[in-house]
Image (cartoon, rainbow, N blue to C red):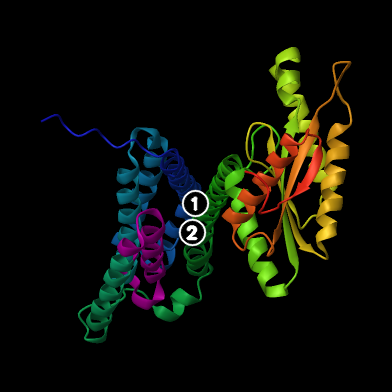
Amino acid sequence: MPAPAAPIPSPDSDFLAISRRRMMDRIWFGLSCLAVLALPASLARAWLTGWLPVYGLHLVLGGLVLLIYLCRTRLSYRSKLCLLIGLFWSIGLAGVLSFGLLGAGIWVLVMSSFLMSVLHSPAAGTYTALATALVIVLAGIAYTHGYLQADVDANAYIRSPIAWWVLLVITSIVPFIVFQAVSAYQQTILALLQQTQAQRDEIEQLATHDALTGLPTVRLAHDRLQMALHASRRSGQGLAVLFVDLDGFKVVNDRYGHAAGDAVLCAVARRLSQLIRASDTAARIGGDEFLLILAELPAPVAAMQVAQRVVEMVAQPIDFHGQALQVGASVGIALYPEHGEDAETLRAAADAAMYAVKRSGKHGVALFSPTAPS
């Protein structure tokens, strides 16, 4: 059997992956700057406490941070993530074991949980937080039972400006570096969501609106008619459906070409849109066929008046490169509830009334009559 085809990666997923890698590199850049600026301050604590193994670890890790940042383009995202969490845990664990509550190791471990949640997954962040809690519990037991002790004078340590500077770096500057990178990533996601929504709106527009005239298509017109019917049933007001078919359109299209025909359709669409109210709907449902939905009519005569104005406005000449193009309109009218109580019946009644106009000579208006020949 042939091997199954590999899934095609989503452009959005590729974009997010690139954004995550950029966020990772921003964090490493911030840490490398911090290593250059803050590592000397950390090592200066040796003047106060004497040289401790943790200082040697800080020196090694600082050099490692610079090396990783310089080689970042050669490392995979997963490798840089593992190294980042390993860095935080090395500093945090060493700080907890060397200084207990006096140092900022616990803060570093907590920050590693946040990084795992953002850079990998919420589940990974939860597991890292549980591991941090376990370390704190075990370290607390070890210190309270005398298995571990801080080899520094607590009072002298907390009076040292350098100790407070290190605490400031760990609890403020490091989170600032991380939060800035995360904020940039969130802005990227927000921009992607806005772009995606705009694309969806465009697709929806193309699916429900005619590409040439911009009017709703038959699908959206049907939905609008259903909504208008529900509103009429609640309010008790009337509703009219007008079926408009252009007369002489084929002659214009054949004589002057499809561009002239398109110009006529666009002009008619504009005129119909200007004629009706904001609560009404004008739709293009076929080649040269239009549908008007007139909601909340005060009286049936209002539909007749609108239909007459449609005939008059459509009959006005349309300029096309110096040529005066002219078409007419046959308009059929169906009223709710007199001629039907559902969308399909009303549309069919308006269509039948329009054909009655065609048979009688075109360029006119007709109200649906059940006794008229079909």
Q: Nearer the viewer, mark 1 or mark 2?
A: 2
Towards the viewer: 46 or 322: 322
Please report contact status of discs 1 and 2: CB closer than 8 Å, yes or no: yes
Q: Which residues are magenta?
A: 98-125
Q: Position of residue 232 (x, y in %)?
A: 70, 68
Query: For the N terminus, which image quadrant?
Result: top left
Label 2 packing within 10 angstroms: few (<14), some (14-19), many (20+) = some
Residue 367 position (above or below residue 319) = below
Q: Amino acid at mark 2?
A: Val
Determine the secondary structure under disc 2.
helix
Residue 159: image location, x then y, percent: 51, 76
Q: Is residue 6 above or below residue 331?
A: above
Does residue 356 appear left or right of residue 275 in this picture? left
Residue 299 lies in quadrant: bottom right
Residue at 72% in and 73% down: 236
Using the numbered discs, state the Cα–Cα distance from disc 1 to disc 2 in whole angstroms.
Answer: 8 Å
Position of 14 with respect to 236 (left or right) is: left
Q: Which residue is mark 2?
A: 174
Residue named by callout 1: 34
88 falls in the magenta region: no
**Can you say which quadrant of the picture contains the C terminus?**
top right
Q: Nearer the viewer, residue 286 or 103?
A: 286
**Residue lying at 81% horizontally and 35% vertically, measured from the top left:** 363
Overall secondary structure of the magenta stretch?
Answer: helix
Query: On the image, which quarter does residue 257 sit in?
Result: top right
Q: From where the camera sits, is residue 201 visible?
A: no
- The amino acid type of the residue labelled 1 equals Leu
Assess whether residue 100 is covered by the magenta stretch. Answer: yes
112 versus 8 height, above or below: below
The correct choice, above or below, for 243 with respect to 294 in the image is: above
Locate residue 317 relative to residue 113 in the image: left or right: right
How far from the left and from the top, in percent, is residue 288? 68, 32
